[in-house]
Image (spheres, rainbow, N blue to C red):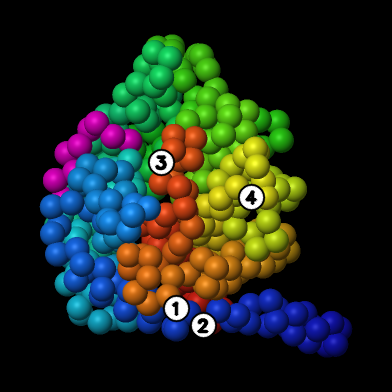
Amino acid sequence: MKKLTLLFALISTSLFAQKIDVDKQIALAGQQYQLMLAAQPDTSTTVHSAKQDGTYRNMPSKWWCSGFFPGGLWFLYEKTKDPKWESAARLWTEAVKKEQFNTGTHDLGFMMYDSFGNGLRLTKDPEYKKVLIQSAKSLATRFDPKIGLIKSWNGFKGGYQYPVIIDNMMNLELLFWASRETGDPRFKEIAIIHADNTMKNHFRPDYSSYHVICYDVDGKVLAKKQHQGYQDESTWTRGHAWAMYGYVEMYRNTKDKKYLDFAQKISDFYLNHPNMPADKIPYWDFYAPNIPTEERDASAGAIAASALLELSTYSGEKGRRYYADAVKMLESLSSPAYRAALGENNHFLIKHCVGAKSLNSEIDVPLIYADYYYLEGLLRYQKMAKK
């Protein structure tokens, strides 16, 4: 028995041994973001991407990605405790503040929880709490109880008036937080109803996902579509990564095993797909027509890596595979194949992302959310390796 215990301990130590030099990667990220801050002194627009000609593609604060750059700065502060990162994070977080009243978007979770949420977690600033509660109230206005879902866009091609996209799973965390903080169960109820209807309608029998589901005024499914993926019946890999992450969050917030089971099944689809490359950084769509010459989407890899690290902690023996694949993704993202050298890539951290090739938009460029989830994944990985 002692030999078996020792053997298991050795296997466990080997599995969780740190393969990525997180301190080195964070130090490089800090150097890159110092250059980014110098190149981007104007907070009236948000850091988002770069164009093929090397110029920045900045966007207004109402853009769905406006919370990711301040969120990344908060991660640097969390790791280093250097007050310069807190100052920078506060500056860029403040730039998003007015969006707490924005009822025209479902993306307030991305925008406000990644910025103000991380800021509140690290500083306990009471003003941040007020902003987040208002943000949750604004998000909740987009929920129609008759349909049972939070409306994503205000319309979709073909005349559809109530489209819901898989990305919306990422905005539910804000609602759970608000329910805990205010004692109002409605926020949590909205999140659960939305997640359950998404589970029912957004996935195929093999646990692959659609991007857009279009509903009528009674909640009946009218159409199942892709927008940023290749075809309606294909699987857009970043959208699927959003789903993996979202259902892991659902389990964390509810401890309802059905969400854990579902997170595992959709993650298994992702990891076991025959078109998943050996380095675990997926093509932009699993069914893109010219694989293996299609572009990879490193942002999908970063999101999935962070999700799988958390999923591994809930999954018993099965979690060992999720952990190993997440580490492989982070190793790939930390390699020169995807990780920019100092001064490269317009000072973004991660190369080779795809926003929407189907729309001829943001093809093989840096995207700020790839940086955000890469940094989150590194910090999660290091915490797990130290346990």
Q: Amino acid at mark 2?
A: Asp
Residue 361: numbered disc = 3
State the extent of the magenta-drawn residues as a range. 97-106
Q: Which residue is mark 2?
A: 21
Total tally of numbered discs in the picture: 4
The crowding category of the residue bearing disc 4, from other C-alpha atoms within 10 Å (few below 14, some 14 to 19, many at least 20), is few
Q: Amino acid at mark 1?
A: Gln
Q: Residue at x 45, y 83 (%)?
A: 24
**Mark 3 vs mark 2: which is more N-terminal?**
2
- Secondary structure beneath disc 2? loop
Nearer the observer: mark 3 or 2; the answer is: 3
Marks 2 and 1 in Cβ contact (< 8 Å): yes
Marks 3 and 1 in Cβ contact (< 8 Å): no
- Secondary structure beneath disc 1? helix
Q: Is residue 343 left or right of residue 285?
A: left
Marks 4 and 2 in Cβ contact (< 8 Å): no
Nearer the observer: mark 4 or 2; the answer is: 4
The crowding category of the residue bearing disc 3, from other C-alpha atoms within 10 Å (few below 14, some 14 to 19, many at least 20), is few
Which x, y percent locates residue 289?
Answer: 65, 38
- Secondary structure beneath disc 4? loop
Magenta span includes 179 = no
Q: Is residue 367 something one can see in this rendering?
A: yes
The relative height of residue 161 versus residue 88 in the rendered view (above or below) is: above
Residue 25: numbered disc = 1
